[in-house]
Amino acid sequence: MTINPGPPEGRPHAPLVTETPDPGPPARDERDAKDTALDAFRAPGPDGPLTTDQGVRVDDTDNSLTTGERGPTLLEDFQLREKLTRFDHERIPERVVHARGAGAYGFFEPYESLAEFTCADFLQEAGHRTPVFVRFSTVQGPRGSADTVRDVRGFATKFYTRHGNYDLVGNNMPVFFIQDAIKFPDFVHAVKMEPHNEIPTGGSAHDTFWDFCSLQPESTHMLMWAMSDRAIPRSFRMMQGFGVHTFRLVNADGRGTFVKFHWKPKLGVACQVWDEAQITAGRDPDFHRRDLWEAIEAGEYPEWELGVQLIPEEDEFAFPFDLLDPTKLVPEELVPVRPVGRMVLNRNPENFFAETEQVAFHTANIVPGIDFTNDPLLQGRNFSYLDTQLIRLGGPNFSQLPVNRPLVDVRNNQRDGYGQQVIHSGTSYAPASVGGGCPAAMGGGRLPEGVFEHYQERIDGAAIRRRSPSFADHYSQASMFWRSMADWEQQHIVAAFAFELGKVADQEVRQRMVANLVHVDAGLAADVARHVGLPEPDAEPVDPGSGEDGDEAAGPRLSPALSLDNLGAAGIRTRKVAVLAGPGADAAQVRSAHERLGAEGATVETLAARGGELATRDGESLPVDRALPTTASVLYDAVLVPDGADQALVTDPDAVRFVTEALRHGKPMAVLGSGTALLQAAEAGEPDRIAGVAVCGPGQTAGTSFWDAFVHLVEQHRFPHR
């Protein structure tokens, strides 16, 4: 038996989450308050008679009302008119950005009370479960685009707290392309499909996006993230989330603390590679949505740990960057992330449109204990998110939609409007003494628990249109990100820039973008220039105060927490392993793969040239989970080839392509006995010399040590140095 783990990656895999008591996911029959509240809006079952919208029972829904069997359709057919009218009005405007997404319900529970820092209800009591709804999304593409495009991913969480709804509306990257919300329409117009031909769908590899970025150097740090593998996650369940902005926690005494929010997946952070992502988009454009849905249905509930970076207000200016700048992150080496709780998603929506499509997130949906800062991008989002729901969801009453309703009673003087669901009585103004009076505001003196009061901060200044000089450094953190990457991550970033700029027709845009990259790293700029056919730019002298020379005044040179090498997690739960078999395969080895890897929580599927049953060399019949023509290696995390089927597999082009792609994408593999012939057919070289491949040669027995070794390879996810 030979195990080649590959060359060292340069950084050890670090545990992702702290060791806290894990009570495990709830049983499926446990129902939270939000699930129970939705009962009032669930449609009745199909057992009763078919009716119109007015409750009139229908005798025939297959034929229109006509004059005779072949005569004209009658205008009085109200059933036909209702059915067609409702169909014609089913669609609503999709989101301008984040149009394509998937969502799920679950809960959040804190590890301990954070009352020292905040009076936010959901952070007060260790173990108290607050219902949540989470929506993941891509940014650029429309609803019909593919899941695995290179893009930022939205990570929005709605907490249904006892003091109202709180929305943490973030992304899977901790920074953004722009500093001021006034540039948001420009950025979105640039990244969206070009107006003359509405191409490309779900991608940024086109002239207008790179023209904008080359002229807007504040986008440079975010571009480094977007060109990294973070922009092509393996799964929603295996990506981080960030609040992006600096927010403020406020405790019961009114004391504020700056905070950055982090979501870290229990399964570790894992990504695709670009070639793999492109193939996946064709093989299964719903790859991420399907993955989330199937994991929850199987009881493999996704889990994230919520962490916070807490910064005392007196340290606001203690950093070499501005905390209000959304193009900057706070390195974990300067302010460690403190784990404060966990979130588990354990229930899929029952109706995509009613729940996932109609859920409305808003950065200004905050609760007592959480408040804003003067981040200019956040301030604009606080206007825009509310404004966009008015047109998308048809008016101001979208908060009455079931998925958006808070669990607490709503009392105010807002009235009427499209889609009003509530029968109000009494007056609709304040103050009022007739008609039963009006709801009482809770101001005056010390406020009782659960009453929101804005954080009190004195601000003096003239009304100006000017950025703070503290926002002017656009390259230091981009350079830190680049230096923090492993060598293979840097290679992928270069390849991504080369691909994207290679799609840009305007030569001046290419040149301008490469010139910007010189400020990040001269070697990066030179590599990208060579790939896109440009002369290598001159390396400009380093500004001593820019941080490009590693001056600690501009922040740390490296942040190991940014590299995927350090974001893995132990175990192989929910990893998908393909057993590539054919007639004559060793039945015992196929069964062992299912039993041994399944015991570790992996999903194991047997693939063969055709569906149905597979005849083994022992005379048994094994069920085939999927036929090779219907699937591809990109839909799996690892591949195992058992002994005995070499003759059938080496002549099957689907099998050879399957293995060739898996090898090219650095996926863990195991080959047993004559299964090594398939690797040779894929022209991979000697199997025992390939990084990330476990080999059990002819005549050898696949014992415990072999299976343990293969599990360890799958745990590492990928071998990029292959």
Image (spheres, helix red, strand yellow):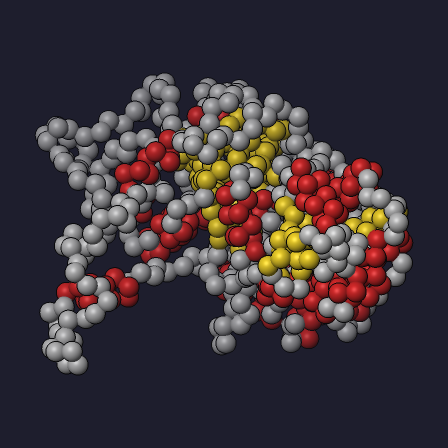
Quarter that holds the N terminus? top right
For residue 388, say whether it is visible.
yes
* Residue found at the very far front of the displayed protein: 619
State the image quarter where residue 161 is shown.
Answer: top left
State the image quarter where residue 617 is shown.
Answer: bottom right
Total labels: the figure holds 0
Residue 251 drawn at (x, y percent): 48, 23
Identify the residue at horizontal 42%, vertical 57% (top origin). Answer: 95
Q: Is residue 646 left or right of residue 314?
A: right
Identify the residue at horizontal 33%, vertical 53% (top origin). Answer: 393
Residue 585 drawn at (x, y percent): 74, 55
Quarter that holds the C terminus? bottom right
670, above or below 304, in the image: below
Identify the residue at horizontal 32%, vertical 35% (top origin). Answer: 37
604, above or below 39, in the image: below
Q: Nearer the viewer, residue 152 or 649?
A: 649
Q: Nearer the viewer, residue 408 or 483?
A: 408
Residue 163 drawn at (x, y percent): 38, 28
Q: Is residue 618 left or right of residue 472?
A: right
Identify the residue at horizontal 44%, vertical 25% (top origin). Answer: 121
For residue 516, say whether it is visible.
no
Q: Nearer the viewer, residue 464 or 549?
A: 549
Residue 362 drawn at (x, y percent): 42, 44
